[in-house]
Image (cartoon, rainbow, N blue to C red):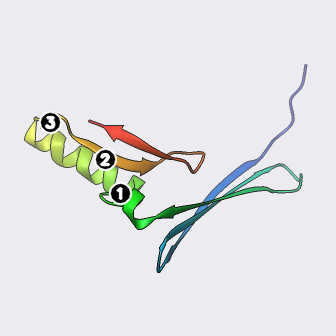
Amino acid sequence: LQLGAHSLEKKTHMVSHRHGMAVTKTLQEGKAEPQRWSFFYGWDELQGLLPEGASLLLLRVLACQQTVPPGLVFPTINTEGHLCSSSY
């Protein structure tokens, strides 16, 4: 059994608008036509949003302090582009 090279490209594009944020997810496998999904979230849903980069920074700060406050939960956007909660 031989498997050839297979590329997979995932992109997340987030655009801030007056009434909220538009999120577009793009998935392209090899040379196939890209698949796209779009979501829109209002600002009330995104209050306290913790993007992926900020989450990594927060993890480093918590590691340096060697403590995690109880009940530390933030809204975040998962790999599929859906709004979810991130608990620490």
Residue at the spot of label 1: 49
- Residue extending farthest bottom: 18
Answer with left or right where residue 63 lies relative to residue 76. left
- Residue extending farthest top: 1
Residue at the spot of label 3: 68
Q: Tag 2 or tag 1, which sits nearer the N-term? A: 1
Give the amino acid type for the residue marked by disc 1 in the picture. Leu
- Check disc 3: other Cα within 10 Å, few if <14, some if 14-19, many if 20+: few
- Spatial separation of the CA atoms under disc 1 and disc 3: 18 Å
Residue at the spot of label 2: 74
Whether tag 1 and tag 2 are in contact, CB under 8 A, the answer is yes
Give the amino acid type for the residue marked by disc 3 in the picture. Val
Q: Nearer the viewer, residue 27 or 14?
A: 14
Q: Tag 3 or tag 1, which sits nearer the N-term? A: 1
Residue 6 location, quadrant: top right
Residue 24 location, quadrant: bottom right
Q: Secondary structure at mark 2?
A: strand
Residue at the spot 88% in from the left edge and 56% down from the top edge = 33
